[in-house]
Image (tube, rainbow, N blue to C red):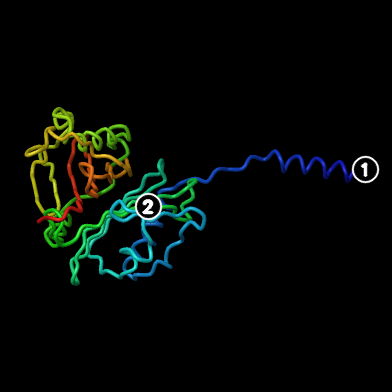
Amino acid sequence: MFLDAVLRITGLLVLTVPTLAAECTREGLLAATESYLTAQTSGKVSNLKLSSSNFTYRQNNVVSDITKGLLSTAYKVDLNRSTADTVACASYTMWISTSGSKPYVVSTQIRHANNDTSSISMIDTVAASTGDLFFDAKKTLGYIQKEDWKIIPAEQRPSRELLKKVGDAYLDMWTDAKAADSIPWGTECERVEGSQYTNPCGKTLPRGGSSKNNGMRRYVIDEEMGSVDCQFDSLGAWPDSHEVRVVAGKVKYVHTVTVMKLG
């Protein structure tokens, strides 16, 4: 009887111990970006730990077969940089390849289900190449190599709410004539749009006129880096990625990757 009582008690304890939720960590997110870059430079999708139950690969806003996409070919990466969003359990990686017959500037968001960074539930890539809007990988590389992307001290970091607001206002400029003036532009803000360089960012901006919103918005927000990346369908048709960095409360950098064939 004593043994039966012990078993009943221990069984009850096992049943009442709560299951701890997985924690999405910055380290886990950035480790996943490293595995993604390894897969890209080797051209081997097998280097990735993909979710066995619910994985999606999206390239230029189209859900497709990962084994037939950009990751199936090895590319020499000249520059890469990643940011992490522990709230959304997602990361953003930008990489540039200037060599070979087809250079690329690529923006990729990686997402993880249930806060579990040990496997990847989505790879979402916007990949611009020769013939796309203002495309010149070597010029883009030269501009971005000069930028300062040090982690922002804790007491100076912009809030998640501010970063989201800035990202949305930037995308709203095409439909809202007042959106541009709501953005805290820095006096030395630099915008790299394809390979076109503009300083300061706050000049030559859209001020409404479009009837179609920039939609299908997917965000990666990193307060430590003061950045927000949003991938979307530009003006209803074109795959697009815009990354904005806010330093000392002002927009410092804007990068755009647009898949829009000219001519």
- Residue under the point 24% across and 48% down: 241
The N terminus is located in which quarter?
top right
Q: Which residue is mark 2?
A: 110
Residue 247 image-quadrant placement:
top left
- Seen from the viewer's position, the closer of residues 57 and 243 is 57
Residue 5 image-quadrant placement:
top right
Is residue 60 depicted above or below 175 in this figure? below
Disc 2 packing (10 Å; few <14; some 14–19; many ≥20):
many
Disc 1 packing (10 Å; few <14; some 14–19; many ≥20):
few
Q: Which callout, 1 or 2, points at the residue further toward the start of the chain? A: 1
Residue 78 image-quadrant placement:
bottom left
Q: Position of residue 258 (x, y in %)?
A: 19, 51
Is residue 198 depicted above or below 46 in this figure? above
Q: Position of residue 71 (x, y in %)?
A: 33, 65
Is residue 238 depicted above or below 87 in this figure? below
The C terminus is located in which quarter?
bottom left
Is residue 211 depicted above or below 34 in this figure? above
Q: Position of residue 53 (x, y in %)?
A: 52, 55
Q: Amino acid at mark 1?
A: Met
Spatial CA span between label 1 and label 2: 55 Å
* Disc 1 element: loop
- Residue under the point 18% across and 45% down: 254
Relative placement, left or right, of 248 versus 44 is left
Q: Amino acid at mark 2?
A: Ile
Residue sitting at the far right: 1
Q: Which residue is mark 1?
A: 1
